[in-house]
Amino acid sequence: MATDASSEGPLVSWYRSRIGDPNTEDEARGYWLFALGVVLGAVGILLFLAGDPGSTVRQWAIVVASAGLALVFAGPILRLPLRPVATWLVGIGLLACAAAIVWFYVTYPGQWDPETGQPTVVGLYAAGLLAMALGGVFVPVLAGRGEAAARAEALEGDVDELETALVETAADEDDLARVVARLRDELDDAAADEGDLAARLRALRESQSRFELYEDRGEEWRWRLRHANGNLVASSGEGYTRKHNAQKGLQAVRRDALGATVLLVEREADLPDADETFEPVEEQTSRADFEVYADDAGEHRWRLRHENGNVIADGGEGYASRGGVEDAVEGVREYVGPADYLRPDPTAVEVYRDRAAEWRWRLVHRNGNVLADGGEGYSQRSNARRAIDRIRDGIDEMTVEVYEDAAGEFRWRLLGGNDRIMADSGEGYAARGGAEEAAENVREYLPAADVLDIGQAVFEVYEDAADEWRWRLRHRNGEILADCGGGYADRSGAWDGIESVKRNAPTADVTSN
């Protein structure tokens, strides 16, 4: 056990400052006893050489040298991590040696026999040295095997706990690295979004349209928004009896249109009545719980289980530590609510940010397959959008090139002016005809495909190889955050599953299994 620096004595403090951190206070004290013994022994020898037989100098020489020898014995033994009985024997041995030295001082030289010495004094001193030798050598040797085995087992248990802690620490470090990488992506996204927002604000200030306020033939006031090319962008839809009310309607459109949500209505007959009011969506109490558990491979995973017992979502991957999966759950809570929908019908265009922090686009079929990729990345999202528009406008004049790659697969790429690659297949085909057919499909689908800008995350609905409909929640960096787990018989079932997750996930509690 390491010593407590706040309660240590001066000997321990000197040892710490001059030599190193002692494991015990006895380690430091033993060292200083040994050092003192060496000094006393050297002084005693010098005094012995300088003194005459029977003189006071010779008397002190023997006293000092004997004390030094006893301390040289005791010091190293105290430094060892021995049983308490060994320490007691060292103390007893020092007391015996000290008593013999005092006895010698009293009897020398008047009552001291130079030829035989004083057997009692010498025997007492020798007994003291023997006691210290017993403490330092024989006690550890004679210690019971059972106690040694117990201490070894305890040490092995400590080592196992330490190894487990190191493994868990490494796992936490890996998961933390993933979280840090995601946060960096989000910071980069925020910076890019700031640039895009600035560009959009500039575009709003430089609008190519204008509001026109006028009185119609029925003497009612109306407004309309008309582009510079003459096209009518929007109109008031109804007339106002007073010019002031028409102006208020116009200002309401200016104020509310930018942040308005979109309600998708499949058929005109299903449109809400014109006078029907609505309230913003309110947060609802969740009817599901996040379950965090360890799978058979020892990885930590999560699933979102509804109170009816159905699993309505689960994680797309396992995590090495519990902290990693809990961070993943928090990410799903954050992203699932505002996540938009990708509805390929039969295709749609995703604009997303890749792992290199560049903006790209891809044409996705409703079965989940990527039909085409952009030929390059862009520093801003708006540049990727403009690239899509350029391809749509000029796709009939662009050249399709089909070629065989190094792996023997056929691919296609769409070439613009100066043979610039505008789009490519993203995957290989076994036959040239397959690549040619795929390129023609892109020519057909791309001009009419809806474009979706992925915010932080997006829901994708697709048809799998078993003709079942599924959904997955994809982060803008391409990472799959969540999926439905099971398939649905029709696409509407997948949409209903998404709505259930959007309602329940943000406020769901976390439980452990």
Image (tube, rainbow, N blue to C red):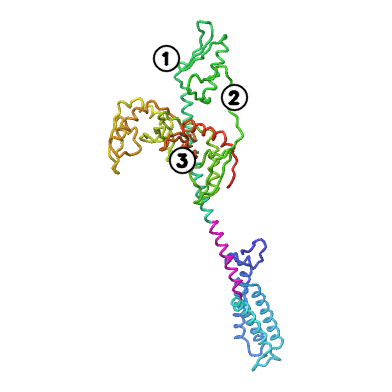
Q: Secondary structure at mark 1?
A: loop
Amino acid type, residue under disc 3 in the picture = Glu
| Secondary structure beneath label 2 | loop
Determine which residue is flagged by label 2.
279
Residue at x 64% of width, y 62% of height: 4
Q: Which residue is mark 1?
A: 230
**Looking at the image, residue 217 lies above or below residue 161:** above
Task: List the residue tagged with mark 3.
Answer: 479
Left-right relation of 398 to 486: left
Q: Nearer the viewer, residue 56 or 29?
A: 29
Q: Is residue 144 magenta?
A: yes
User: Does the CB distance between marks 3 and 2 fall below 8 Å?
Assistant: no
Disc 3 and disc 2: Cα gap in Å? 34 Å
* Residue 432 inside the magenta-drawn segment: no
Badge 3 element: loop
What amino acid is labelled 1 in the image? Gly
472 relative to 164, above or below = above
Give the residues drawn in magenta, as a range. 143-165
- Tell me, yes or no, if residue 34 can be seen here: no
